Image: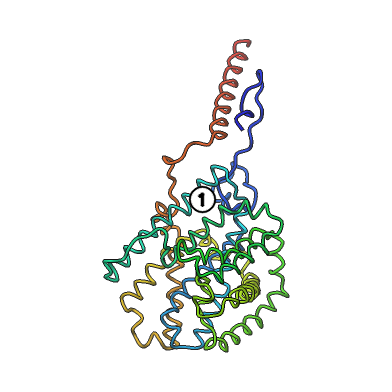
Amino acid sequence: MTNSLRPYGNRRMPLPPAQSPDVEPVEPRPPQTQPRSTQQSKQRDAFFDNAKYLAIVLVAVGHAWEPLKGDSRVLEAAYMVVYSFHMPAFIIISGFFSRSFDMRPSRLKRLITGVAVPYILFETAYPLFKRFVNDEPDQKISLLDPWYLTWFLVALFLWRVTTPIWKTVRHPLPLALAIAMMASMSPEIGDDLDLQRVLQFLPYFVLGLCMKAEHFQMVRRNSVRLAAVPLFALALGFSWWAEPRMATTWFYHRDSAQELGAPWWSGPVMTLAMFGCSLVLTACFFAWTPRRHMWFTALGAGTLYGYLLHGFLVKAGDFRGWYDHDWLHRPLGEVFVSVLAAAVVTVLCTKPVQRVFRFAMEPKMEWAFKRDAAELAREREKAESRADDSRSGGREKARV
């Protein structure tokens, strides 16, 4: 790169075009003469923001159901259905928007400030929160053992770092599935960095990397939307039947088959079976996701805020006995908890909350990074061009 920036006589080689640090390009940037808000609205596809928001609402509702589901077989069945597709949908979208990731300094800087730093901060904050709210003075802080929700940040960091590999190999999805299958029967992997989840959820991220925009168009056809209704009904019926026969911990993808008390060979079988079921239900979810701009579309840009912050409220309710009231364990109470969880995570995705917590979620940290050489060269070239224009203008005036 440095050779291309050196002058040759009085001529300079053209510099590469400026690259946006955003790893989620959807459309080309509009002209800079337009207002910033207009540019952002044209860059983002309402469908993906709607899908991200609805997925994060289901994540929060599923977490709110955990203390209640043991009292209701119907709620347990609904919990299994939601857990079979809400994180796969979120991870597929993450993979789709990671297709442009490479090892350029701007991309790495965004990965560090937007994923690694929030992980360090929240992995520190959650144990401290548990220590004081749940009165556990011995609760330790360990960056190697993700607690509760922070596993996703570890996974996203590792998935994105390995993106160039998946874009290079010939058959990325079968390879990712093979890795997930082997992980499901390998208890010796241990709990460090929650690698079981990282590896078992890997195929969904790789699938997102392999997808194109037209693939999402396929599941948004009316025929698929109509088929999604009986498929969801069938999934609920099957989950109601399977609830007393199958442990819901399979859906967490955090343990091997042996750790769940099953034979080793069931790990690969369940990995393939759950991957297929999750893809079907995720396609149904995408089919019913609105494709036009909705009142909640703008909240799709703040889903990571809602994801990481709602965990404090869920755990506070668990630690402080908020679920001990008997009426919450009845149908109306379950509906109330569901609506409350959806409302809370919606508020946590709003712009005011983003402004308050941006220091932790999207720190700029300009002091920690070197300026990109190409960017500095472009600035020098622009300054020299302005100086040349100024001198040329002065000479023209002198001639006159």
The answer to whether residue 255 shows anywhere in this view is yes
- 138 vs 326, nearest the viewer: 138
| Mark 1 neighbour density, 10 Å: few (under 14) some (14–19) many (20 or more) | many
In the rendered image, residue 339, in percent from the top left (x then y), is placed at 45, 77
Q: Position of residue 89 (x, y in %)?
A: 59, 67
Image height check: is 182 above or below 19?
below
The answer, for residue 42, to whether it is visible in the render is no
Give the percent coordinates (x, y) of residue 29: 62, 47
| Number of marks in the rendered image | 1
The C terminus lies in which quarter of the figure? Answer: top right
Residue 68 x/y as whole percent? 42, 83
Left or right: residue 54 versus residue 399 is left
Q: Residue drawn at (67%, 52%), measured in percent from left and top?
A: 168
Comparing 173 with 258, the one in front is 258
Amino acid type, callout 1: Leu
Colour scheme of the picture = rainbow
Location of residue 41 with respect to 260 vertically, above or below: above
**Which of the pair 225/187 is nearer the observer?**
187
Label 1: which residue? 111
On-image quarter of the N terminus: top right
For residue 357, side relative to residue 179 (left or right):
left
Figure check: 356 above or below 89: above
Residue displayed at 35% across by 75% down: 317
Occupied quadrant, residue 201: bottom right
Give the residue at the far top of this rendering: 399
Which quarter of the picture shows residue 205?
A: bottom right
- Please name the residue shown 50% across and 63% down the image: 195
- Image check: 265 left or right of 213? left
Q: Is residue 123 above or below residue 396?
A: below
Q: Secondary structure at mark 1?
A: helix
